[in-house]
């Protein structure tokens, strides 16, 4: 699952219309889609990132965040 480099889901939502700050974790190919939907998370206990743990479904259009659920 892709790591979303945001301290909270709320912060991720404030970045709609911008490029996504993420870390790929898959050994089987890129999970990021410049046009499409995928699931990502912030796991601060595993990645030592600051912020809250959350999971989000992200929809991208033309390389920009279109929506977050």
Image (spheres, helix red, strand yellow):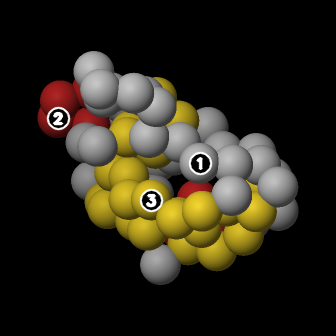
Residue 66 in view, yes or no:
yes
Q: Look at mark 3 in the image and give the residue it sits on.
A: 38
Dot 2 alpha-carbon crowd within 10 angstroms: few under 14, some 14 to 19, many 20 or more: few
Could you tell me how far apart the alpha carbons at marks 3 and 1 are, in whole angstroms? 7 Å
Could you tell me how far apart the alpha carbons at marks 2 and 1 are, in whole angstroms? 26 Å
Question: Contact, CB < 8 Å: mark 3 with mark 1?
Answer: yes
Q: Who's the residue at 34% across and 51% down the image?
A: 41
Whichever of callouts 2 and 1 sits on the residue coming sooner in the sequence is 1
The image shows residue 6, relative to residue 38, as above or below, that is above
Q: Quadrant of residue 50?
A: top left
Q: Look at mark 2 in the image and give the residue it sits on.
A: 45
Dot 1 alpha-carbon crowd within 10 angstroms: few under 14, some 14 to 19, many 20 or more: some
Q: Quadrant of residue 26?
A: top left
Q: Who's the residue at 60% across and 62% down the image?
A: 36
Between 67 and 14, which is closer to the camera in this rendering? 67
Between 41 and 26, which is closer to the camera in this rendering? 26
Q: Who's the residue at 53% across and 42% down the image?
A: 32
Between 46 and 26, which is closer to the camera in this rendering? 26
The image shows residue 68, relative to residue 64, as above or below, that is below
Determine which of the numbered discs, if any, sits on residue 33 in the image. 1
Q: Who's the residue at 77% across and 49% down the image?
A: 63
């Amino acid at each position: 699952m892709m790591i979303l480099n945001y301290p909270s889901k709320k912060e991720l939502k404030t970045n709609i219309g911008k490029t996504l700050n993420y870390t790929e974790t898959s050994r089987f190919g890129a999970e990021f889609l410049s046009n499409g939907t995928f699931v990502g998370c912030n796991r601060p206990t595993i990645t030592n990132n600051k912020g809250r743990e959350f999971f989000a479904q992200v929809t991208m259009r033309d390389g920009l965040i279109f929506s977050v659920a």
